[in-house]
């Protein structure tokens, strides 16, 4: 899977709607993050995330995160570091 194929327009999380209904806190976090960039939920809702264009933009979001949540920035990889093993 290439990162371009794993964008909000190409993938979805079928559990997101259910998690948002059952756990309003998940919906609240997604709604808050969505003011900055399209927000999505990981797996069954342990985390929400958004892809942004720059580290500076990510830092601004982290700095504004409500204190009731934890926030951090991460970098995406073009290729998994172990993808060349076994070749």
Image (tube, helix red, strand yellow):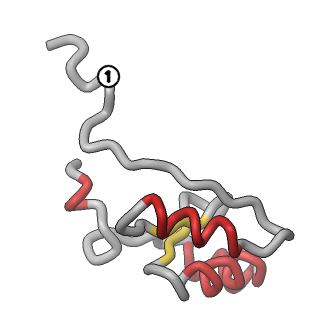
Name the residue carrying label 1: 82
Residue 43 screen position, x and y as percent: 55, 58
Q: Specify few, some or many for label 1: CA neighbours under 10 Å numbering under 14, 14-19, or 20 or more.
A: few
Residue 36 screen position, x and y as percent: 51, 82
Furthest-left residue in view? 87
What's the residue at 20%, 50% (across, down)? 2
Q: Quadrant of residue 22?
A: bottom right
Q: Does 55 sit above or below residue 52? A: above
What's the residue at 35%, 67% (across, down)? 53
Q: Quadrant of residue 73?
A: bottom right
Residue 54 screen position, x and y as percent: 39, 63
The one nearer the camera, 60 or 83, is: 60
Residue 32 screen position, x and y as percent: 64, 84
What's the residue at 57%, 63% (across, down)? 59
Q: Does 14 sit above or below residue 43? A: below
Q: Quadrant of the image for the C terminus?
A: top left
Furthest-right residue in view? 68
Tell me if 45 is positioned left or right of 76 in this view. Answer: right
Q: Does 37 sit above or below residue 80? A: below
Tell me if 5 is positioned left or right of 54 in this view. Answer: left
What's the residue at 63%, 61% (across, down)? 47
Tell me if 68 is positioned left or right of 45 in this view. Answer: right
- Disc 1 is placed on an element classified as loop
């Amino acid at each position: 899977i290439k990162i371009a194929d794993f964008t909000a327009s190409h993938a979805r999380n079928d559990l997101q709607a259910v998690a948002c209904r059952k756990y309003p806190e998940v919906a609240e976090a997604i709604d808050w993050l969505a003011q900055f960039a399209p927000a999505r939920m990981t797996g069954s809702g342990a985390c929400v995330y958004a892809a942004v264009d720059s580290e500076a933009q990510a830092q601004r979001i982290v700095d504004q995160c409500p204190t009731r949540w934890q926030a951090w920035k991460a970098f995406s990889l073009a290729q998994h570091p172990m993808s060349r093993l076994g070749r």
